[in-house]
Image (cartoon, helix red, strand yellow):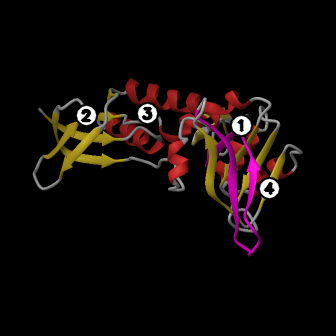
Amino acid sequence: MVHEVIIVGSGPAGYTAAIYAARADLAPLMFSGLEPGGQLMTTTDVENFPGFPQGVMGPDMMALFREQAARFGTDIRDQSVVSLDTSVRPFRLVSDSGETFRAHAVILSTGASAKWLGLPSEQHFRGYGVSACATCDGFFFRNRVVAVVGGGDTAMEETHFLAKFASKVYLIHRRDSFRASKIMQDRVLEDPKVEVLYNSEVVEVLGTDDPVQKVTGLRIGSLVGEPDREIPVDGFFLA
């Protein structure tokens, strides 16, 4: 069987493509990928999307997107594409189940994923206090100290969310000002639980493996010539 169109990815772009293709009677096949719904699945309040004056939870929005795409006939497979051969026509794709698919057109809407710092210590404690999803793991840090690294809207949102649970949140940023929207900055900067470390970077995630593998702190490097310092934290979140 040769499909008219196959869509790789299931974030907002993928579902939009699916809705249009399905309404054009192209019977699209969608592969949802490793993170069905995309990064919005780890987003709390979405306030900048038209049609939701009171805001909407990211997972709720993506559930509506999926429902709408399916309503018009999109075949949604909760699988990933592991290879795509564009040297042949129709295009040839292989899923992680080992199946081969053919399509006259392929739409790539693979989106984005967490940007890790690339520190060996970061990967060592990944899942043991290091996380890229505040909404997934924030609850586990109730009344504890955590840190967030970043300077955009995602960092602000993660910090704002974590402050609901944590006793203190460090927000670590390489520059002396944020690129996030003003309204998001104001929410964070007005929160007494939040301490901002400007002109700073994380150079090492500190922790222990005995008796339990866990994060205990961060070594912070200065980008303006000040000495390195260590701060005690129980959790570290990348945004």
Viewer-closest of 234 and 71: 234
Task: State the CA–CA distance, disc 4 to disc 2.
Answer: 42 Å
Quadrant of the image containing the N terminus: top left
Q: Is residue 74 above or below residue 134?
A: above
Task: State the CA–CA distance, disc 2 to disc 3.
Answer: 14 Å
Give the image location of residue 167, x and y in percent.
82, 36
Q: Can residue 104 be seen by looking at this rendering?
A: yes
Q: Is 238 included in the stretch rendered in magenta?
A: yes
The residue that mark 4 highlights is 196
Left or right position of 18 against 141: left
The amino acid beneath tag 4 is Val
Residue at the spot x=57%, y=42% of the render? 132
- Label 3: state its secondary structure: loop
The amino acid beneath tag 1 is Pro
Sooner in the amino-acid sequence: mark 3 or mark 4? 3
Viewer-closest of 108 and 197: 197
Indicate the quadrant where residue 209 lies: top right
Task: State the CA–CA distance, disc 1 to disc 2.
Answer: 39 Å
